[in-house]
Structures are given as C-alpha cells and as structure tokens.
Image: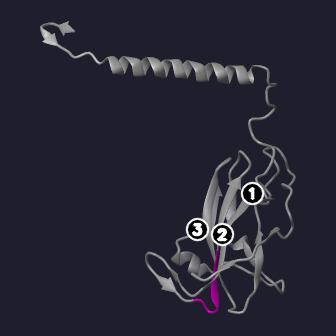
Amino acid sequence: MVRAGRTTPTYPLIAVVRAAALVLAAAVGAAGCEATAGAPPSASARPSHRAPGEHRDGHLVFTVLALRCGLTAVAGTHSEAQPDGQFCTARLRVRNADPAFHTYVAAQQRLVNADGALARPDSFAMAVRRQHERVEIGGHDLIEIEVWYDVPKRARVTGLRVTGDRDPDGYLSGATVPHAPDGVFVPMTPATGP
C-alpha cells in the first residue's frame, strides 16, 4: 500500500486474527445470552449460603485458615521474642457480611485448651508481628490477620473461639445483631512446630 509517497507494509495475518477475535467474541456473547434468556432473574446478587469452614458471629464471618502451635519464637521487622511457654498462631480471614462498617477486635479471639481454658492474644507477640488490635472493616470487605498466643508448653489446643461485633442489626434497628454470647467455637487440631 502506498500513502503519500511512502510504502507501508500490509499484514494480512493481523486482519485474520482481528476477524477471528471478533467472531469468537460474538459467539461467546450470543452463547451467554441464550443461556440466561430463559432463566428467572435472581432475587439477590449476594449468595445466601456460607462456604464450608465459615463461622458467623454478629456481622462478621470468620474462616480459620491456619492454626499452628509449638513455636519457640516470634520475629518481626523490629523485634523478636521468646514465649513463656509456647507460641500458637492463627491466621484468620474475617469478612464483613453487612454494608456498614464493623470492627474486628483481636483481643476477643481466644484459643481454647482441652481443659476449657481460654487464652487471649499476646499483645507483645502481636506488636512484634505488627498486627492491629482493632480493624474497622468496610461494608462487604474482608481482611486476613494473624493472632498470636503464648500458652503453657503442655497446653493441648482444641480450637479457637471467634467473636464478632455486637452492633445494631441494621441502620434503623435498635436490636443487637444475632450473635453467640461467648463467640463461636471452631474446633481444630493445630499443626506443630515452625
């Protein structure tokens, strides 16, 4: 092809690829329309079910991603520490299932021992790992966080008791959101060692 005295190459392969992409896009679009044309509209864009492993308390939905005990130290960017007994750490995913802000509080998440004893998070280990004590979670957002505990060396951990918020049920509601009075017990056998 010649334009204003310059020769520009033609690329027939590019034209073929573009045409194929347009045909493919049109086919996918048409298939999507046919698949949903006869389906009734859904009542809600949000799923009404919970995934396995999710535990709801208040507006917050918890998933315990990992639980590990028998750790002999904790290290961070600015400090390190040894436990009085052994460190246990839990990695949690916390999802706000409501459109309003709700607050996650680390101190309310307790480790459960076989004898029923509850351990609160170790504030120094949490500071070493730079984990927040409180996190305000936006509407329909989620966070992942570590919680660190210092428990006796012979403690036999059986799970975690997670606790959500105690906020009003809704924007104009004076009633507290449904919740378990002492949080929700999540049974779990911890992995051991570093």
Furthest toward the left, the residue is 5
Mark 1 closeness class: few <14, some 14–19, many ≥20 residues within 10 Å? many
- Image side of residue 133 versus residue 8, left or right: right
Residue beneath the point at 75% across and 86% down: 156
Would you say the residues marked 3 and 2 are in contact, meaning their CB atoms lie under 8 Å apart?
Answer: no
Q: CA distance from mark 1 to mark 3?
A: 18 Å
- Place of residue 115 in the rendered image (x, y in percent of width and height, measured from the top left): 83, 87
Task: Give x and y (percent) for residue 121.
Answer: 66, 78
- 60 vs 125, left or right, is right
Image quadrant where one finds the C terminus: bottom right
Which residue does the numbered mark 1 point to in the structure image?
Answer: 61
Return the x and y of residue 137 as percentages of the image width and height: 64, 55
Dot 3 lies on which element?
A: loop
Mark 2 and mark 1 lie on one chain; the one further toward the N terminus is 1
Q: Please name the residue that numbered disc 3 is placed on.
A: 132
At 55% across and 89% down in the image, what residue appears? 82
The residue at which mark 2 appears reads as: 66
Q: Nearer the viewer, mark 2 or mark 1?
A: 2
